[in-house]
Amino acid sequence: MKQVVCSKFAGPADCEHTVEAASSEAAMEALKPHYMEAHQDMMAAGTEETRKQWFADFTAAWEAAPEM
């Protein structure tokens, strides 16, 4: 199980929303409602390229996050 903060998962630098999950897939699912509510602007402005970069940043952050 890992615990991460949205800002460390390629979210806005000032977002402190916390997610706990056992896998990167579960973390991504847990973040979806948060992103749709709190970061609609980022979601709407996304392009295929920025989504790929977000996923790469997300994956790197997940792998670097310490186990709880």
Image (tube, rainbow, N blue to C red):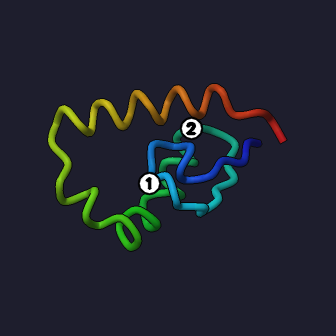
Q: Which mark is residue 28?
A: none
Quadrant of the rendered image containing residue 53 = top left
Crowding near the residue tagged with mark 1, few <14, some 14–19, many ≥20 C-alpha atoms within 10 Å: few
Q: Quadrant of the N terminus?
A: top right
Judged left or right of residue 12, residue 40 is left
Whole-percent x and y of residue 50?
A: 24, 37
Nearer the observer, disc 1 or disc 2?
1
Whole-percent x and y of residue 3?
A: 72, 48
The amino acid pointed to by label 1 is: Pro
Residue that numbered label 2 is attached to: 24
Give the SS element for disc 2.
helix
Q: Quadrant of the C terminus?
A: top right
Q: Which residue is situated farthest in the front direction here? A: 14
Give the SS element for disc 1.
loop
Q: Which mark is residue 12?
A: 1
Residue drawn at (49%, 52%) of the image = 13
The amino acid pointed to by label 2 is: Ser
Whole-percent x and y of residue 22?
A: 69, 42
Residue drawn at (15%, 42%) of the image = 47
Q: Which residue is situated farthest in the right direction here? A: 68
Residue drawn at (69%, 53%) of the image = 20
Which of marks 2 and 1 precedes in the sequence? 1
State how far apart marks 1 and 2 are (Cα). 19 Å
Q: How many marks?
A: 2
Judged left or right of residue 24, residue 55 is left
Crowding near the residue tagged with mark 2, few <14, some 14–19, many ≥20 C-alpha atoms within 10 Å: some
Quadrant of the rendered image containing residue 44 = bottom left
Whole-percent x and y of residue 39?
A: 36, 64
